[in-house]
Structure formats: C-alpha cells, structure tokens
Image (cartoon, helix red, strand yellow):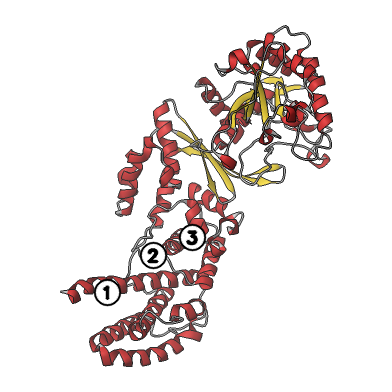
Amino acid sequence: MSALASLVRAYDRMAERGEVPAYGYSQEKISFVIPLNPDGTVAHAPIDLREGEGKKKTARLTAVPQPTKRTSGVEPNFLWDKTAYALGITAGEGKRTSREHDAFIIRHREWLASSSDEGLQAILRFLDRWNADQFAGLGWPDDMKDQNIVFALESERLANVMIHDRPAARDLWTRLTATGDKTSAACLITGDHAPVARLHPAIKGVWGAQSSGASIVSFNLDAFTSYGHQQGDNAPISEAAAFAYTSALNHFLERNSGHRIQVGDASTVFWADSSEAQPALEAESLFLGFLDEKEAGAVGLKKLESILAKLRAGRPIEEFKPDLPQGVRFFVLALAPNAARLSVRFYIEDDFGVIAERYLRHLERLRVEPPPKEEAPSMWRMLVETAVLRKSENIQPNLAGEWMRAILTDTPYPLTLLSTLIMRLRADHDVNGLRIAILKSILIKNFNMEVPVSLDPECREPGYLLGRLFAVYAQIQTAALGRNVNATIKDKFYGAASAQPRKVFRMLEAGSANHLSKIGKQKPGLKVNLEKAVGAIMEAMSPEGDPFPASLPDKSQALFGLGYYHQRNEFFKKSEKSAPEEAA
C-alpha cells in the first residue's frame, strides 16, 4: 500500500471517531472571533481565542472551510481569513491590502447573495458597514493584525458556534466546492472515477518547511508535466482522496498529537491500523517511547519499562516478543523540507511486531558497560553526539533519515555515521558512553563483528588493544601527576594515537617510564600493577606483526575508542572499590 493510500484509510478511521474535520474543512490556527449582531454591527470587542501568556500565545486550531491555495494571486477564504482580507488591516506596509479586502467583499457578496440565513446576512451587512479606519477608533488590539479571524453571532458565540458552523453555511460551502468545470478520472489512490484535484491542500507542520504549507504532490513547471496535462491532471487523485490524505497528515503533524517526533531534519509521523483500537493505541505509545522514553503515553508506559528493563539486563529479545501488540499494521513516514515541496525521507509499512523487534535489536546493539547516562537515548540525543558543539543545527541533513530508515528496515547503518563520530572524537576527545555505544552498534551491524559489551581481556583486535594501552598510559600519568594537569595524554594525543599509532605510542612508552619511576617512590604496589597492565596488553598483541601500525582504518579507530572506554572505566571501578577499604 502506498503512503497516500494508507493515509486515506487512516483519515476514514479518524473521521468515524470525529478526530479530523469533515470533507471540505480543515484545522487552521484561528486567533480571534468577531461577535456580530444580526444587523451587522459589532456586539463588542473581538474575543481572543489564543492560549498562553505574552509572546508565547498560540492560536487555537479550529475546523473552518478549507483555505484556498494561494501562490501570488489574491484569493479570499470562505467566511474566515487573516485581517488583511477580512478587515483590510495589516501590520506591515500592506501594498496590496486594499486589493485583498476588496476581493474578500466582492467574493462574499457573490457567494452569500442568494442566502437568507441570519448569520450569513450578518456578515454581508458587516462588510457593507466596515471601514478599515474603524479598527483604531474601536481600540482593537494591535496584536490582532495579520491573525486569522472568524465571525459569530453574539447569540450563538457562548455555545461556541461560529457562522461557518451554521447548517446554511455548510450547505452553501458544499455547493460551492462541487461547482465548476472539473476533470474526472480514475483516482490513483481509491480507484473511484471522480473529479480530480487540480491543486492539493497544503501540508503544514513539517519542521523547516514554509509556514504557509508545502506539497508532496505538485506540478508547477513544464518539465514536470506530460502529454499536455496541467497540474493535478498529471497524477489524477480525486478531490476527496487529496483532502483525506492531507487532513490525516496535518492531524499527525500537529504538536503534541502523539503521532510525530522530530528526527534530525525529518519530521517523522507514525500511525497504526488494527481491527481493535486498544492494540493500535498501545503500539503507537510504545513506538513513541522507543524513540523518546519521556514521550511514551500512559497506555504503553508500563510495558515499555518492562521491555527496556529486560533489554538492559541482556535478556534475548525472543523472550519478550509476546509483550508486543499483536495483529497491528504499522506505518512510519518521514518528511523533510525541500523549497515549496516536501521530500519523503522514507516510508515503512509492516507488522508492528517486526518493526518493534528491529528497533529493539538496535537498542541491544547499543548496550555497553558501563552504560551511558541515558540507557534508552532518544534519536535526537544520539544525533547531537555527531554534531559540532552538540548543536542540533549542525547535524548532517540526511544522516537522521538514513539512520532511522536503516534501523526500521534492518539494513546497514550509513557509514557517514561512523566517519562523523570518529571525526568528533578526534576533535573534542570526549569518549563518552553514548558515542561508544553508537560505534559499537555500527561495528556489529555493518561489519558483522563480535564486539564486547564490557572489558574483554581476550579480545585480540589491534584497535581494541591499542585503545586499552592508551588508557593505561593515561592512568599512569594521572597516578604520577594527579588530575590537575593542564593537558592530559588524552587531550594531547587521542586523535593522533587512534589514527596513526606509530607516531605516538613510542613517545608515550618513553614518557610512562618517567611517570612509573615517580609512582614507584610513593606507591610501589601501584607501580607493579600498572606495569602488569601494560605487559598483559603487549603480550596480547600479535608478535609477528607491528604492534604500532602506521595508520588505522575507521573500523579500527572505532575499536580503539571502545577499548579505551572499557579500560578507563575498569580503573574507575577499582578506585571505587579501594576507596572504602582505605577509609576503613
């Protein structure tokens, strides 16, 4: 099933539950409502519908007649619009504000002329009376300018009924959207023979895209057309199907919808399809929790905690497959901005148990001892480890989508992830648990290696041994000079040691002799232990090969970081154990 077809099916299910607007309507940000008397006079000052305080006020999402798709032309909306159209008022210079307001008046006179409905006639009378100069005289707030507004009869406003909600307005809007010379064809999504959508409704809420909305399907240049077809006729999708897939997608993209998460530059939405509502809701909650444990809904939180606890304990995934919702079809769609269009980073459709198992295997590959602070880190938390200064705007544009797609489809990770992490380690020398966990997962997935979770004295990989040896030399320096040194061995030499060991390790070996001599005068037992640690690692190195090669490939540099991390934390464990003994 295509992404658009599955979105249409999702819309049908949500429409039955009243979660999405009816055909011809859409959820738009409305900030103010103007209360009218039947004679068109303003009952009192506009009502502010926004929520929040000060500059953090946010407009209320309200179902209104579907907006026109504006490019460079002047096209008013039906019974609502921004103040430039509805009132002839704007905060800027407004070079074409008068044209926009005139168009709003002319079109509404055409649309409402034959109606005798009290509410629709009130709007006509208001437009006949209204003059833009009245705005300042009435003392209406300046922050109302350029906001979307609707109208209501004062007698119905307290019941939260706007004029566009009145039955006469809905019937008129249905007739208006059904008129016109429209081409009919077989819809590519539903197969029905129906009027084709010339332009598809805008998709809003994709991070980085135009605030007015963008399109997945559009034809605005001759190069995109074929056989002389214009716009939507090139890929015939019925108006009903176009409305359905965009309404469902806009609903999923809403903030706090429980169906979206930001993965780098990819706005990722997901939804479930099941014959029963509870397993579908549980699957969506679990999936959101996998990507960000803090965002997990109450439905799947307990089950999520149970699954992650078993995973952290090293239990095999096969043991807790029954904990996953069964019989649920799951969909994941990632969108990224691309000028006026949207790029589909990836689209995945599969049984939820399959997708969840793939993600759990990814978490299993991340397991390392000692664990990072976040044992089940969000995708964003892992991605910022690849960015310069850990700023989200420095994350490579395509990396997030490629990595997430690889995880959910069980394919090799992008190798740019490996090279980027190694570059960051060489630049800032921050060998933390999260970075090492990611490197470990790459080695397992891409190179099919058996990589140790914790310190493994039996591992004979050259990169791993060199990393361990580097950690021992760093510990020798710390034991001799203390922790208050201007620049440690790691600060000075980690990048060179991991990439070109031959240039560094002979020098480190010579320097460690002086440090060990100093340690021997104060703590001869510690000196012996450190010398044994160096000797054990050197003995594990291949005797016939050069223990210090001229260079290490990326794979071995990842092992270098893992070996350093394991050995360094082994010293921390020993110091923690010895501290109570010394105190006693």
Q: Residue at x 45, y 28 (%)?
A: 274
In the picture, the disc for residue 446 is 3
**Residue at the left extreme of this rendering:** 584
Vertically, is 498 above or below 138?
Answer: below
Asked if the residues shown at circle 2 and circle 3 are in contact, with their CB atoms under 8 angstroms apart, the answer is no
Lower sequence index among marks 2 and 1: 2
- Return the residue at label 1: 575
Q: CA distance from mark 2 to mark 3?
A: 12 Å
Number of other residues with Cα within 10 Å of mark 1, as a class: few under 14, some 14 to 19, many 20 or more:
few
Say which of 513 and 135 sits in front: 135
- Return the residue at label 2: 451
Identified by mark 2, the residue type is Val
Identified by mark 1, the residue type is Ser
* Pair 1/3: label in front: 1
Say which of 425 and 575 sits in front: 575
Identified by mark 3, the residue type is Asn
In what element is the residue under mark 2?
A: loop
Q: Residue at x 74, y 28 (%)?
A: 137
